[in-house]
Image: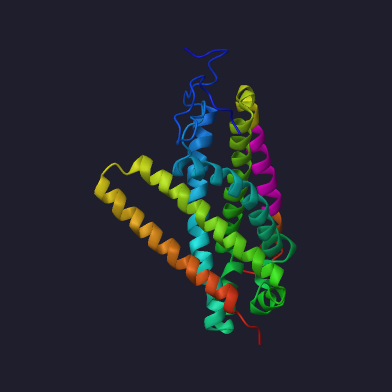
Amino acid sequence: MSGPGSSTVYRGKAGQWAFITHRITGFLVFFFLLLHVVDVSLINASPKLYDEVHQLYGNIMLRLFEVGLLGALLFHSFNGLRIVMIDFFPEAIRNERVMFRVVVFFTVVLTAAGGFVILRPFVEGRIL
Amino acid sequence: MPTPVSDRPAPSGSRPKLERRPRQNFETWSWYFMRISGLALLFLALVHFSITHIIYDVVETDARFVAERWDNPLWRAYDWTLLALGLLHGLNGLRWIMDDYISSPTRRAATKAALYSVTGFLFFYGTLTIVTFQSG
């Protein structure tokens, strides 16, 4: 049934993966935001407590988590742009698969580059 | 503005009917909101992440760092906008997800009630933090 001209119908390919991944990354970023409001708000209770809790973000486990957060943010951002483009310029659906690959490409490249910066203190042995 | 349709005169005392313009209900506005807030959040969130994780290392963003940054009311406005749009965008996204995956009306209502309460509380708490913070 698939073939040229059928690209406007969902058939469990790139569009389906983009849809599912968009939901999962949005869900994860939202729950990080809830946590982040709490950890930042500690600063009013006690700046010292804020600093202690905040030092945890420098730990390697949380640095890996931050790389994951960056990847989720980037995917959700770029795929969101793809959605907006398709919504406002419906002809763009013809290039849907290419656009999805562009989204994945930029997500992977920029997550790797940002991840390198975030993990560098660990790689260089400056932190545990 | 769309032009009035029909060749019949509009009934006196009522507004003319408009052609091909579905009623703009809450879901239509939430659809537009997701696109517009999403575009804003793309810049707000990625700039915020770049400052706190790429330009500075995360361990440098201590209480003193926050105090210096929040000395400038524009950064407070920036952070508050990110907080408000991020929570609303996420709230609406989760509302859509719950509508799709929780089929029992009772459980859906209960989950939404929990989501709205937690988000509302954290919006209030976060706003309070940004507004009332005083350095030193």
Q: Is residue A113 magenta?
A: yes
Name the spot of residue B123 as percent of width and height, x first: 49, 65
**Image quadrant assignment for residue A14:** top right
Please give left or right for residue B124 compared with residue A128 in the image: left
Residue drawn at the location 51% of the way across and 48% of the way down: A26
Report if residue A100 is visible in the image.
no
Q: Which sits in the foreground, B83 or A79?
A: B83
Reply above or below: A75 against B14: below
**Image quadrant assignment for residue A91:** top right
Please give left or right for residue B116 compared with residue B18 in the image: left
Q: Which sits in the foreground, A117 or A96?
A: A96
Name the spot of residue B26 as percent of width and height, x first: 45, 44
Tell me the magenta residue range.
A100-115
Q: Is residue B64 magenta?
A: no
Residue drawn at the location 41% of the way across and 63% of the way down: B118
Reply above or below: A43 against A93: below
Identify the coloring: rainbow
Report if residue A68 is visible in the image.
yes
Please give left or right for residue A124 compared with residue B128 in the image: right
Name the spot of residue A83 as percent of width and height, x first: 58, 36
Please give left or right for residue A109 compared with residue A25 in the image: right
Residue drawn at the location 62% of the way across and 32% of the way down: A88
Please identify the quadrant where the C terminus of chain A is shown.
Answer: bottom right
